[in-house]
Amino acid sequence: MAYIDEKRLGQITRHARERIGSGRLMGMSAAVCGPDGHIYTFVEGDAARTGEKLTEKSLFRLASMTKPITAAAIMIQSERGYVRIIDPVSKYIPEFEHVCLFDGNPARPIEIRHLLSHCSGVAHDAFGESEFAVYGPKEGDTLSTVVPRYAKMRLPFQPGDKSGYSAVAGFDILARVVEVTSGMRFEDFLRENLFGPLGMTDTTFHPTPEQMNRLVELVTAGEQGIEPCPSEGIFPGLPGGGYEAGGAGLVGTLGDYLRFARMLLGRGQLDGVRVLTPRTVEQMASPAMPYVVPGIGEEVRWGLGMRVIQHLNGYSAPLSVGAFGWSGAFGTHFFIDPVLKVCAVYMSNLSNAGGAGAETAFEFENDVISSILE
């Protein structure tokens, strides 16, 4: 059985303090759980340039760490028989019946699993981003108004033929499928089926005024240290507004996301509350497509909503084969290693932090895994 050396976990503290002291981070939070529960928490630095201190109740922009939550929502609907992951999206959103490739030829049907595994072609690469700029969310949009417009975006490849990354649109479509099949607004569904049962009381698309006061300022690490971010509105509808961006829209606390990660480590269950079956979690954490994830390492494949480590070759920290998780562009990251029975969450908010390929993500994984003695 794996044993976690808490003294070795001090590397997380040392590296964080080095980054904060050198002006590369304003503040950072992290937590690690082993097979017997919570082991380590680090919360240090500022929540804003005005000097307010980061606390365990600080809220972070989760960015693409919204995606695994959206994936879990789809899988709940799959377990209930409302969705099959091999279903065409057009079954739920008719506008997707006639999607085209960028050369004007008709595309094959986009399936739910294509969206979950970033193999749909929706808003992929520079061409897709230009399409997203035209058809993406505008002021006043909701999922019900913006997602049908996504069907007008042309695809750079046939769905299922290769892997890319759909930063926002693909998982917004999945969020809309949840709405259509449940008859509920997406956040209401999440609150009833995930956030409420798991005790994630501070995770939301729509922060209250009190929660907004706890929201960490989005900043940039520049040549002169921490600088104002040029724009708070990097992703539409973040935070608040009517548009619940299933690909990048949630805010939440370190503790809340740790509960989500612990549920996945617990194979769908946390503190006696089950939200997914063990088989579903196994499916989410298994490669859905054979393609290498571009830019992240040749050992990585896409599961359903998350990356999955397939073999160890030095590109990433020495996670076990079968470890899974994901990151956010603003410096959030989490992983579950089911072999070592550990999960960990990292939170910061920098507009230029990077996601799963960021140095901080590798460093955090390495610090955690290096503390495990078998």
Image: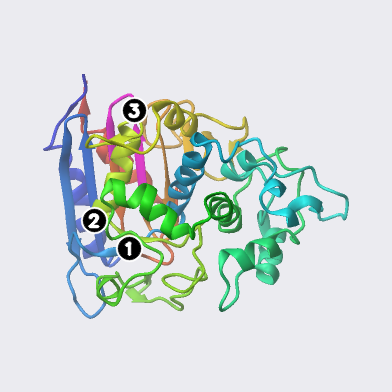
| Residue 201, image quadrant | bottom left
- Marking on residue 29: 2
Q: Amino acid at mark 2?
A: Ser
For disc 3, the neighbor class at 10 Å (few under 14, some 14 to 19, many from 20) is many
Q: Which residues are magenta?
A: 332-343
Q: Are marks 1 and 3 in contact (CB under 8 Å)?
A: no
Q: Residue at x 60, y 70 (%)?
A: 137
For disc 2, the neighbor class at 10 Å (few under 14, some 14 to 19, many from 20) is many
> Does the magenta-highlighted stretch encompass residue 182?
no
Front residue of this view, candidates 306 and 211: 211
Front residue of this view, candidates 365 and 265: 265
Q: Is residue 81 left or right of residue 371?
A: right
Expressed as whole percent of the image width and height from the top left, the position of residue 38 reads 17, 40
Q: Are marks 1 and 2 in contact (CB under 8 Å)?
A: yes
Q: Is residue 148 left or right of residue 58?
A: right
> Does the magenta-highlighted stretch encompass residue 333?
yes
Q: Amino acid at mark 3?
A: Pro
